[in-house]
Amino acid sequence: MSNITRDEVKKLAVTIESLAHGVQSALDNNGDVLAVANELVRNNLTLVFALGEFYATQSSPATTKSVSAKVVSNPNNTKVANWHNVRDSRGRFAPKSVNV
């Protein structure tokens, strides 16, 4: 569902309301509650996701931000040691003080 509208959300709410009345009448008449309840739950989940999408599209600003890239530099030309998975001559992990 892309770009959901307010009318579609209202239609889902009306459907949920009629299904809730269907569950109540099925309970009163000893009818098949499970089928109507499953449809009610499915529509409730659809409504939750539709409301989230509706909120996201309504609250997002119309303007887009421009992002400027920064150049990362090493002004002192220092070497950064990568000590990930460094091993000594015996095959063990080396501490940072050992020159390998």
Image (cartoon, rainbow, N blue to C red):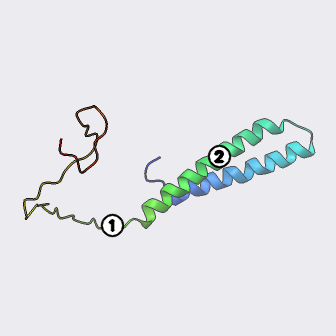
Residue drawn 48% across the image and 55% down it: 53
The three-letter amino acid code for the residue at tag 1 is Ala
Q: Secondary structure at mark 2?
A: helix
Residue assigned mark 1: 62
What x and y, as percent, mark residue 99?
Answer: 18, 45
The residue depicted at 70 percent of the width and 40 percent of the height is: 39
Q: Residue at x 83, y 39 (%)?
A: 33
Q: Nearer the viewer, residue 71 or 44?
A: 71
Q: Compute the Cα span from label 1 to label 2.
A: 30 Å
Left or right: where does residue 38 sit relative to residue 33?
A: left
Residue at the spot 86% in from the left edge and 42% down from the top edge: 26
The residue identified by callout 2 is 43
Q: Position of residue 63 (x, y in %)?
A: 29, 67
Q: Amino acid at mark 2?
A: Asn
- Position of residue 56 relative to residue 29, above or below, is below
Q: Are marks 1 and 2 in contact (CB under 8 Å)?
A: no
Callout 1: 10 Å neighbours few (<14), some, many (20+)?
Answer: few
Left or right: 96 with respect to 3? Answer: left
User: Total marks drawn?
Assistant: 2
- From the top left corner, tell me how far across and down residue 91 is, in percent: 28, 32
What crowding class fits label 2: few (fewer than 14 Cα within 10 Å), some (14-19), or many (20 or more)? some
Image quadrant holding the C terminus, namely top left
Element under disc 1: loop
Earlier in the chain: of badge 1 and badge 2, it is 2
User: At which x and y percent is residue 40?
Assistant: 71, 45
Name the one closer to the observer, 23 or 79: 79
* Residue extending farthest right: 29
Left or right side of 50 for 44: right
**Disc number at residue 21?**
none
